Image (cartoon, rainbow, N blue to C red):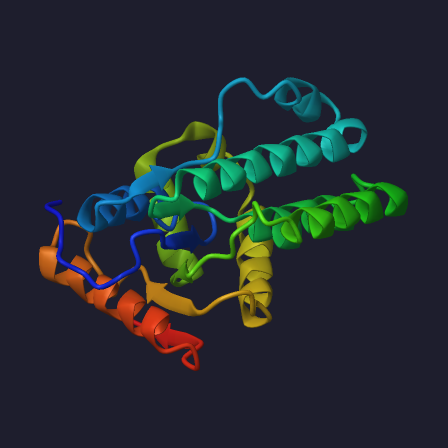
Amino acid sequence: MNKVEHQLNDKSLITLAGTVGVGKSTLTNTLADALGYKAAFEKVDGNPYLEDYYSNFKTWSFHLQIYFLAERFKQQKGMHETELGYVQDRSIYEDVGIFAKLQYDNGNMTDRDYETYRSLFEAMVLSPYFPKPDVLIYIDGSLEDIINRIHERGRQMEINTPHSFWENLYSRYKNWIASFNICPILHLDINSYDCRDSDSVKEIITQIEKLQKNPELKYVKL
């Protein structure tokens, strides 16, 4: 995707959110290229807890979530220090509001551990190293369309995951975004845009500009 002329701040942080399979990574790369920003992805290699976690959810969920929280904070701090524009794949708010809460609700975190986790998160977001996104792009679609995409990309672990898990995660995202008020939201349906089409990408950028220029405008759906 060629760079697109735009009116966004050079230090803007555009964060993408949405359940597994909606196309966050693809849109992150597309928008970063079009805006001339850096793309920021969560660290997936070198996690010291994953193997233990999959062998015993209850023992290791707290440790795993703390690790993710620390890595996400370091990423935010690094982006803040570079003073560059970023498009970020997945937010720390999802880690806390969806994935850690899921572990807690499933009995894999004690009350004490969950409260400690929440307290640490709240201390982190007060830090000057923790910039709020200028705009959060929430990618959504029907559950059927999302599951079809999961099967199309062919990751066996995801394909073998019970349908009930995807239903639960989908419902949690719906509830989470309904109460999200950290920054303005651009709500994208997965069938409303095409990353391969420059006009479609330009329209997304136009809507991001609109949200950044109009502080009173909190929500746009495309």
Of residues 182 and 148, the one drawn nearer to the viewer in this rendering = 182
Q: Quadrant of the N terminus?
A: top left
Residue at the spot x=70%, y=19% of the render?
A: 52
Residue at the spot x=22%, y=61% of the render?
A: 193
Of residues 139 and 14, the one drawn nearer to the viewer in this rendering = 14
Q: Is residue 47 visible?
A: yes
The image quarter containing residue 107 is top right
Relative placement, left or right, of 162 versus 84 is right
Residue 69, placed above or below residue 139: above
Residue at the spot x=64%, y=55% of the render?
A: 97
Q: Is residue 164 visible?
A: no
| Residue 59 at x, y percent in the picture | 81, 28
Q: Quadrant of the C terminus?
A: bottom left
Q: What number of labels is visible?
A: 0
| Residue 93 at x, y percent in the picture | 58, 53
Relative placement, left or right, of 29 versus 183 is left
| Residue 34 at x, y percent in the picture | 18, 49
| Residue 153 at x, y percent in the picture | 32, 37
Relative placement, left or right, of 22 versus 19 is left
Of residues 178 and 71, the one drawn nearer to the viewer in this rendering = 71
Relative placement, left or right, of 111 versus 132 is right
Residue at the spot x=31%, y=40% of the render?
A: 38
- Furthest residue to the bottom? 216
